[in-house]
């Protein structure tokens, strides 16, 4: 596999734009796009909120780990991960080895504004999401590639992601 076939993996907290930006990057590079949360919903046949409610978060994380390894074994993909997927050290290692991981960042005000506009039901939003953001901050900040999305259009962010990928090959 050529270095240019490496996956592009987007991580970051909910509301930072992973899915929107991921779709644009995939279009731009003419690559298949995978949203891990959407993929899990498809495989499980129920929403993430339902998986959390009926089987618990640990069952969800188990499905997520399996999917992570499945996707990392492929190449040429643009992958938007669920906000918690790469907080897990094992998942992080697997994805970092399979391609370029870019962490999208935004300030809490931006995240709140985006989540309020978003019809998707997010089980973790019902709790104290600011505490969750704080809890994950170190994991997110540890990624070498970071893009701040506050005050930028999804197109601008997608361009930055493509540039980071291009220089990393």
Image (cartoon, rainbow, N blue to C red):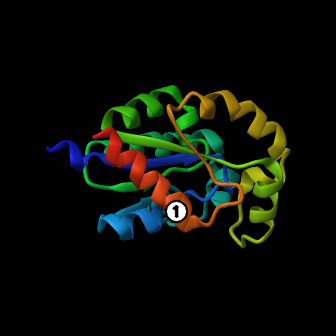
| Residue 55, horizontal then vertical, whole percent | 62, 48
Residue 56 shown left or right of residue 6 in the figure? right
Under circle 1, the secondary element is helix
User: Looking at the image, which is closer to me, 58 or 141?
Assistant: 141
Asked whether residue 22 is in view, the answer is yes
User: What residue is shown at x 84% (from left), y 47% (from top)?
Assistant: 127
Asked whether residue 46 is in view, the answer is no
Residue to which mark 1 is pinned:
21
* On screen, residue 10 above or below 157: above
| Number of numbered tags placed on the structure image | 1
* On screen, residue 144 above or below 129: above
Task: Check disc 1: other Cα within 10 Å, few if <14, some if 14-19, many if 20+.
Answer: many
Residue 69 shown left or right of residue 75 in the figure? right
- Quadrant occupied by the C terminus: top left
| Residue 126, horizontal then vertical, whole percent | 82, 54
- Quadrant occupied by the N terminus: top left
User: What residue is shown at x 58% (from left), y 34% (from top)?
Assistant: 87
User: Looking at the image, which is closer to me, 112 or 129?
Assistant: 112
Residue 110, picture quadrant: bottom right
User: What residue is shown at x 55% (from left), y 57% (from top)?
Assistant: 18
* On screen, residue 158 above or below 164: below
| Residue 109, horizontal then vertical, whole percent | 83, 54
Residue 49, picture quadrant: bottom right
User: Looking at the image, which is closer to me, 138 or 73?
Assistant: 138
Residue 104 shown left or right of residue 102 in the figure? right
């Amino acid at each position: 596999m050529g270095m240019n076939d490496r996956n592009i993996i987007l991580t970051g907290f909910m509301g930072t734009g992973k899915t929107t930006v991921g779709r644009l990057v995939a279009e731009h590079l003419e690559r298949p796009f995978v949203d891990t949360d959407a993929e899990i919903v498809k495989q499980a046949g129920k929403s993430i909120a339902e998986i959390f409610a009926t089987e618990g978060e640990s069952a969800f994380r188990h499905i997520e780990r399996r999917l992570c390894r499945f996707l990392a074994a492929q190449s040429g993909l643009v992958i938007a991960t669920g906000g918690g997927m790469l907080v897990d050290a094992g998942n992080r290692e697997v994805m970092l080895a399979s391609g370029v991981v870019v962490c999208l960042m935004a300030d809490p005000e931006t995240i709140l504004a985006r989540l309020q506009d978003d019809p998707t039901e997010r089980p973790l939003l019902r709790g104290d999401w600011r505490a969750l953001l704080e809890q994950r901050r170190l994991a997110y900040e540890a990624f070498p590639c970071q893009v701040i999305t506050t005050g930028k259009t999804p197109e601008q962010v997608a361009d930055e992601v493509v540039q980071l990928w291009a220089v990393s090959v």
